[in-house]
Amino acid sequence: MFTKILIANRGEIAVRVIKTCRRLGIATVVVYSDADAGSLAVEMADETVHIGASPAAQSYLVADKIIAACKETGAQAIHPGFGFLSENAGFAQRCADEGLVFIGPNPGAIQAMGDKIESKKFAQAAGVSCVPGHIGEIADTAEAVTIAEQIGYPVMIKASAGGGGKGIRVAWNRQDVEEGFPAVRAEAKASFGDDRIFIEKFIESPRHIEIQVLGDKHGNVVHLFERECSIQRRNQKVIEEAPSPLLDEATRAAMGAQAVALAKAVNYDSAGTVEFVAGQDKSFFFLEMNTRLQVEHPVTELITGLDLVEQMIRSAWGEKLAFQQSDLKINGWAIESRIYAEDPYRKFLPSIGRLVRYAPPEEGEKDGYTVRNDAGVREGDEISMYYDPMISKLCSWAPTRLAAIDGMGRALEDFHIEGLGQNIPFLAAVMDQERFRSGKISTNYIKDEFPDGFAGTNPTPDQLDILTAVGAAMQRVYAARARSYASGLAGPPREDWVVAVGHAKRNVKVSEHDDGVTIHLVDEGRSLSLTAIDWRPGKPVFRARLDGQAFTVQVAPAAEGFTIRHRAAKARVLVLTPRNAELHDRLPEKKAADTSKLVLSPMPGLVVSMDVAAGQLVREGEVVCVLEAMKMQNIIRAERDGTVKAVNAKSGDPVAADEILVEFA
């Protein structure tokens, strides 16, 4: 077995590979850029090598630097993780030429299947059912428009070397192609160093299902069942699960057999994924093959009990697979939620900055479910604009799908992050939706369920009880502390209060009992029992049991009262005396500032282009500017007609969130 492996990647996947190598007794080398100098992966590795500046094109994508680091440290093999050089056939061949082992498929398999254009040609020749489209390179925007109109809208514009949701757009008309083609080409060049583009028919209301395959160097290939990856935003997977709620045994077997046949046809010898687009009627078409480890591989590991990183290492060493297809079984259900540094309340725009607080849920077995969290960060780390905005991958496993969903909901409750925007409330909202719980999903799910973006959810009756009880309990603690500091105060604490959760007001009586607090809802004639309270002033997380049911909420002091969030339901909670409640109702509401004539930067990033000038008449929907953050280009459009009064940024300028870019007269 290898004695030393170099990991040509960063973040959570680098940490993930290190953990397996430690268990196998293999020393690790991590390469790092300027931005990752203090990263968790660098801390955990046995050896480290600095390979350049923060942009990936100057560090993680430079093959010469990776090879030099191997020779410098004596590493025998390279694990590329995912992204960067993981699907680069030239790099895999370079490793072989240098006497190094590439822990992934052979260069021929990458060449045949890793390239999206070539894989389509190969699949068609092998008799695999493919989505209709143009299989070949596209020279320019004009040719892209011609091809799109020949195929018929909607079409999908995709980078040949793409992956991870980058370098991909859906075009519904000619204008979308004219704007999307150059944007996809630019993203592809920046992310993969390859700007070749192809176009295929976009199938409406599809499901995204992928088959995990695993091969060795002796011709053996098996599949490890499927993953459903239909919950996507901008073609970036957000929630994955294994197995799929769509498939029956016959369809699962057919998809698995097709994936294995395709892998065998190219002599595949590592972990890889064959992706399909599936209809609600269980029909399916080959999309592409990812010749690498997938981001969502943990859910497959949870239902099979296999370590895919270990299997890749053993295959690269030359070992035969230790099992056959008949030995593999699905055990339970697993869900993965990708925790991203993005603000769901602001159309999911990237959010960079420091993790002032980072407190993930405890891993391991819980009450009926298991939690796993793959992360490459810790409290105090910074999420950089140079790389993917993923913070961690939170997984839950349980014997059934609904139990796994419930476990994920509880795990998301227990996840606390401060310092930057993150999508935990949105993920929790999906877990609570009846449509998701029913399994009736598609890649249009987020667009269908959140057509106007995400603004949180209104508290359910149960959540209203939680927010009421927590607010009352917190107020009682603060009042007791104030009484302990004040002299001359006598008598029992006040019991009569009015708890306002948003605009909903409830008259309550609060009293203590041996295990916690009782909140009597006066107007409803019932009581809430709050027990096992784990909270003190200043703590941002409040854990307790309400009528015996465990829950966790995020809490913070506000200008008045508290801000409390349970899953996706967030509210300002005031605990007032009856008289103060009457007076509070008379206060005028504060009006928000008028920003209708301003174009504000929705995120920190870099101005790629400024497309308007002072004095210019701009129509609604026209492009004002293009911003780039975390390798994604974002087109900012005018929300109404108007004349530009001032332009405050130019191409190449870095900008902060909410910075004024353009002012209209």
Image: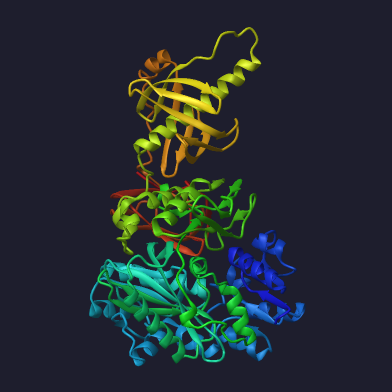
- When the figure is inspected, residue 528 is found, relative to residue 397, above or below; the finding is above
Work out whether residue 328 or residue 624 is closer to the camera in this orientation and state it: 328
Work out whether residue 598 or residue 200 is closer to the camera in this orientation and state it: 200
Q: Residue at x 50, y 83 (%)?
A: 324
Q: How many marks?
A: 0
Q: Where is residue 110 in the image (x, y as percent from the top left)?
A: 50, 85
- Residue 233 at least partly seen: no
Q: Where is residue 51, by image quadrant?
A: bottom right
- Residue 651 at least partly seen: yes
Q: Is residue 169 left or right of residue 544?
A: left
- When the figure is inspected, residue 144 is found, relative to residue 47, above or below; the finding is below
Work out whether residue 451 or residue 611 is closer to the camera in this orientation and state it: 451
Q: Where is residue 412 in the image (x, y as percent from the top left)?
A: 49, 49
Q: Is residue 267 left or right of residue 481?
A: left
- The quarter of the image holding the C terminus is top left
Q: Where is residue 553 in the image (x, y as percent from the top left)?
A: 49, 39
Q: Residue at x 64, y 85 (%)?
A: 317
Q: How is the image coloured?
A: rainbow
Q: Residue at x 44, y 54 (%)?
A: 349
Q: Where is residue 458, by image quadrant?
A: top left
- When the figure is inspected, residue 229 is found, relative to residue 221, above or below; the finding is above
Work out whether residue 447 or residue 438 is closer to the camera in this orientation and state it: 438
- When the figure is inspected, residue 225 is found, relative to residue 546, above or below; the finding is below
- The quarter of the image holding the N terminus is bottom right
